[in-house]
Amino acid sequence: EDQVTQSPEALRLQEGESSSLNCSYTVSGLRGLFWYRQDPGKGPEFLFTLYSAGEEKEKERLKATLTKKESFLHITAPKPEDSATYLCAVGYNQGGKLIFGQGTELSVKP
Amino acid sequence: DGGITQSPKYLFRKEGQNVTLSCEQNLNHDAMYWYRQDPGQGLRLIYYSQIVNDFQKGDIAEGYSVSREKKESFPLTVTSAQKNPTAFYLCASSNRGDRGETQYFGPGTRLLVL
């Protein structure tokens, strides 16, 4: 069964305390792995797309990496404004459809 | 500014009533999608359309209907057959391509039942 699992469900960090969020997946024919940030009551905001194992992308304090079974979103020296829910999604063989994980709720305290 | 707009931001439905959520995009994207988001759950696909005048059911299409008469517009109707419609509804759009194409989301509509 095609599945995407994110861990942990919730993560509390102190400002400046680096950490990683995990997204593990089992799909037939990966056609891209996508990371989004979602603030309460708003639509998801696109962060990264990764297509191949070994690929990495960075944006400010965020870095996304991809292996054949999972992706990590590394957050370096986070700030309170990084607090949000981070969603992972994978595209698979059935056209443009995505499967979403449940998200990781990140809270960064000053 | 290019983007996706959804209206209204909040919508109240009475029992037995059909309601329609609007989604418009000016990104010139071919594909459009509707998702439902419930607390503690990931986004679930309701319907999607890859070209005008064509659409497919997603994982939870029962109680919903859509149309795609224009490239820019993909309205979603929540019918009275949907017994648990309270949720946050998100519209997205993307290009079509051989690789997985990034989906961009609108601001969402929160549907509440009176």
Image (spheres, rainbow, N blue to C red):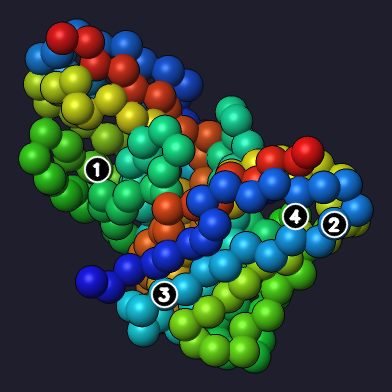
Dividing the picture into quadrants, the one containing residue B19 is bottom right
Marks 1 and 4, how far apart at CA? 31 Å
Q: Is residue B29 left or right of residue B91?
A: left
Q: Is residue A49 above or below residue B110?
A: below
- What secondary structure is found at the residue carrying circle 1? strand
The residue shown at (33%, 30%) is: A84
Residue at 72% in and 57% down = B59
Residue behind mark 4: B60
Q: Amino acid at mark 1?
A: Thr
Image quadrant occupied by the C terminus of chain B: top right
| SS class, disc 4 | loop
**Amino acid tagged 2:** Gln
Chain ID, mark 4:
B
Q: Which residue is mark 3?
A: B25
Sequence-earlier tag: 3 or 4: 3
Say yes or no: labels 2 and 4 on the same chain.
yes
